[in-house]
């Protein structure tokens, strides 16, 4: 079998394919929005540290395992251990994770294709026309005073944010949580009760709730801050008023009208995206089409399919990206965006953000489930292990940062919130493209086409992990394996597409509750399976991989580099992952822990 195994055409081909796997929706869709919600700056630095100290060593470990075994993960652990052991389960865990991720990945990837087409046919034209008409009406009919008030309120909200965050930091997160529970319990039902009765029950309820000493303390603490909070709000308001007072009447009219128009277009874009989420048939159509393209590439083989596709798609992707970054650099908001991404800003970052950074580093590098073990198994040439890993991680991180530099200037130029969350790509960006007008059609089409390219080179690796099992273990032909696995993924993908309409599909990316089918899959795979897989891969490569095999893979590395890698893979990477998992199980709350350390 070993002689007939397919291999990459060159080392460069391997690096391109593995970077293709790494660079995906995670880089362009998720990274900018978690950077936005975590306030940029520090989050980016911490993300970089996670990539270097945890991601890179595990990436190298995966390549090492694959290259050494020349088999896909399930089979690889048997080959390396010389017999079936519990480690093979690790291969299975990875395959299941790949399958699960693929089923929802193709749905989101399908949406990017849908949006590419939508921009090509200028779908925002009617939206734009209505918005312009209505905003002219607004400009003509709304009083100057009212316009001024909306501008002041808007500006005050922005100014108040850091002030309120500072006050929030004075209490442990648990106090705020308990206070929220208290308020929720108070406000439950009672809405349609007679006023006198309602008042009674409210007081009764309040008394009952406050019997709990922890809650009583939390409520007292939070209530003692009400004055400070109100003061912060009024400071923000008066600063905002002073600022807006310096504007001329014309400026006020222009700004308020623009804001009004953004609001209209934003609502329309949200409605359009929601309509797509609710439309199971359209989502399924695109997801299946996307899967079919992926299958065609994987079925064509390692060199002629995967490598060839990545050789074309990756450079085109990079070129499109650089093009959009150049466009973004012409916007006046470019400087603001750069300082948002790169300038450390402490108030928005919480320890839970640090853990999110580590989790995302796994997803973004595409490690933890053996995709890179599989890719490594198609490599004949030995050596340069760390160099290859550095290239892959460097490209992945570079693209994630470029994605920020391309999106945030556009987001800022059109007055949008960088912390908008998951809707950043499918709502805020289309809004901005619509505002740009006809040039926006081209920019939008390029942007979404770039996203689908990034997605397809990633989906390939997810499919390949599963396909390679049927090839390596059952001796199936590549075409037949691809077809069977591809159809299975498409089928489950269709269910995901139909299930996504029930609520806001992305909720799990921010919170873990109220999950539908889609959310549950993502939650399971990226929060549990990848870190667990990564943990065991690190432990295996560091402690259990036969030394002679490990030495053979790093024979050409500098002994100091090797020693550093061994230290990271044996101790640091496992320890970091365990901390992340412990927080997820709920063993501790990182935000609370930091509060207690600081105070
Ligand atoms: N890295 C890809 C992204 O950022 C997703 C992906 C592809 C992946 N292959 C993977 C994630 C393997 C984990 C494991 O979108």
Image (cartoon, rainbow, N blue to C red):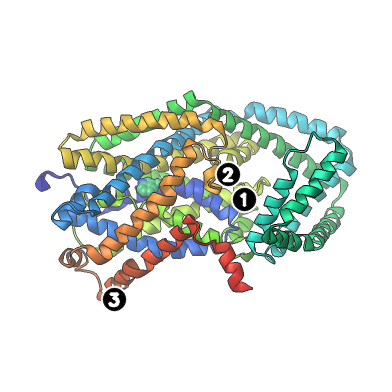
What residue would you read off at disc 1?
418
Q: Residue furthest top?
A: 281
**Of callouts 3 and 2, the N-terminal one:** 2
Element type where label 1 sits in the image = loop
Query: In the visual, does 329 lie left or right of 531?
Result: right
Mark-to-mark CA distance, 1 and 3: 42 Å
What residue would you read off at disc 3?
560
Query: In the visual, does 301 lie left or right of 36?
Result: left
Crowd around label 1: few <14 · some 14–19 · many ≥20 (10 Å): many
Q: Which quadrant would residue 390 be assigned to in this image? A: bottom left
Up-down relation of residue 333 to residue 564 (above or below): above
Residue 516, position as x, y percentages in the image: 51, 37
Which quarter of the rendered picture does the N terminus lie within?
top left
**Of callouts 2 and 1, the N-terminal one:** 1
Q: Which quadrant would residue 598 be assigned to in this image? A: bottom right
User: Does any portion of residue 326 appear in the rendered image?
Assistant: no
Element type where label 2 sits in the image = helix
Residue found 86% across the figure and 50% down from its top: 248
Please say if the residues under marks 2 and 1 sit with CB atoms less than 8 Å apart: yes
Residue found 63% across the figure and 28% down from its top: 125
Up-down relation of residue 96 to residue 163 (above or below): above
Up-down relation of residue 156 to residue 191 (above or below): below
Up-down relation of residue 414 to residue 167 (above or below): above
Residue 153, position as x, y percentages in the image: 80, 49
Residue found 35% across the figure and 59% down from its top: 535
User: Does any portion of residue 280 appear in the rendered image?
Assistant: yes
Element type where label 3 sits in the image = helix
What residue would you read off at disc 2?
424
Residue found 43% across the figure and 25% down from its top: 285
């Amino acid at each position: 079998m070993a002689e007939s195994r397919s291999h990459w055409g060159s080392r460069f081909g391997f690096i391109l394919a593995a970077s293709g796997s790494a660079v995906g929706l995670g880089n362009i869709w998720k990274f900018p929005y978690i950077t936005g919600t975590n306030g940029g700056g520090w989050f980016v630095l911490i993300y970089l540290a996670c990539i270097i100290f945890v991601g890179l060593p595990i990436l190298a470990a995966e390549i090492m395992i694959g290259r050494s075994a020349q088999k896909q993960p399930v089979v690889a652990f048997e080959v390396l251990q010389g017999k079936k052991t519990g480690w093979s389960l690790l291969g299975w865990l990875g395959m299941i994770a790949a399958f699960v991720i693929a089923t929802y990945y193709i749905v989101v990837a399908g949406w990017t294709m849908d949006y590419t087409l939508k921009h090509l046919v200028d779908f925002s034209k009617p939206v734009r026309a209505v918005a312009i008409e209505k905003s002219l009406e607004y400009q003509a009919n709304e009083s100057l005073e009212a316009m001024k008030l909306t501008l002041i309120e808007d500006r005050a909200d922005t100014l108040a944010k850091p002030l309120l965050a500072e006050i929030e930091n004075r209490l442990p997160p648990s106090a705020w949580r308990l206070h929220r529970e208290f308020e929720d319990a108070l406000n439950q039902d009672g809405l349609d009760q007679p006023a006198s009765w309602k008042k009674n029950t409210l007081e009764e309820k309040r008394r009952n709730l406050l019997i709990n000493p922890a809650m009583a303390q939390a409520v007292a603490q939070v209530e003692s801050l009400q004055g400070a909070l109100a003061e912060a709000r009024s400071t923000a308001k008066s600063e905002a008023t002073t600022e807006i007072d310096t504007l001329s009447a014309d400026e006020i009219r222009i700004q308020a009208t623009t804001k009004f128009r953004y609001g209209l277009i934003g609502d329309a874009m949200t409605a359009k995206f929601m309509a797509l989420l609710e439309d199971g048939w359209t989502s399924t159509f695109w997801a299946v089409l996307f899967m079919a393209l992926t299958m065609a590439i994987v079925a064509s083989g390692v060199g002629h399919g995967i490598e060839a596709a990545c050789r074309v798609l990756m450079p085109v992707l990079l070129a499109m990206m650089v093009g959009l970054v150049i466009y973004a650099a012409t916007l006046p908001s470019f400087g603001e965006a750069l300082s948002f991404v790169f300038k450390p800003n402490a108030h928005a970052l919480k320890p839970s953000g640090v853990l999110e950074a580590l989790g995302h580093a796994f997803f973004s590098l595409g490690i933890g489930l053996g995709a890179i073990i599989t890719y490594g198994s198609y490599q004949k040439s030995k050596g340069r292990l760390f160099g290859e890993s550095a290239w892959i991680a460097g490209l992945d991180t570079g693209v994630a940062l470029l994605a920020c530099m391309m999106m945030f200037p556009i987001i800022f130029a059109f007055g949008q919130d960088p912390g908008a969350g998951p809707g950043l790509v499918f709502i805020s960006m289309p809004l901005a493209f619509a505002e740009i007008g006809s040039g926006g059609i081209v920019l939008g089409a390029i942007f979404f086409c770039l996203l689908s390219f990034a997605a397809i080179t990633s989906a390939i690796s997810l499919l390949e992990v599963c396909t390679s099992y049927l090839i390596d273990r059952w001796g199936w032909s590549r075409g037949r394996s691809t077809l069977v696995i591809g159809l299975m993924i498409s089928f489950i993908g269709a269910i995901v597409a139909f299930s996504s309409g029930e609520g806001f599909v992305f909720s799990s990316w921010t919170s873990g509750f109220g999950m539908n089918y889609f959310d549950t899959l993502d939650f399971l795979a990226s929060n549990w399976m990848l870190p667990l897989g990564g943990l065991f891969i690190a432990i295996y490569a560091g402690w259990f991989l036969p030394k002679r095999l490990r030495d053979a893979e790093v024979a050409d590395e500098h002994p100091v580099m090797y020693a550093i890698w061994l230290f990271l893979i044996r101790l640091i990477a496992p320890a970091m992952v365990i901390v992340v998992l412990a927080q997820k199980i709920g063993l501790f709350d990182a935000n609370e822990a930091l509060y207690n350390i600081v105070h």
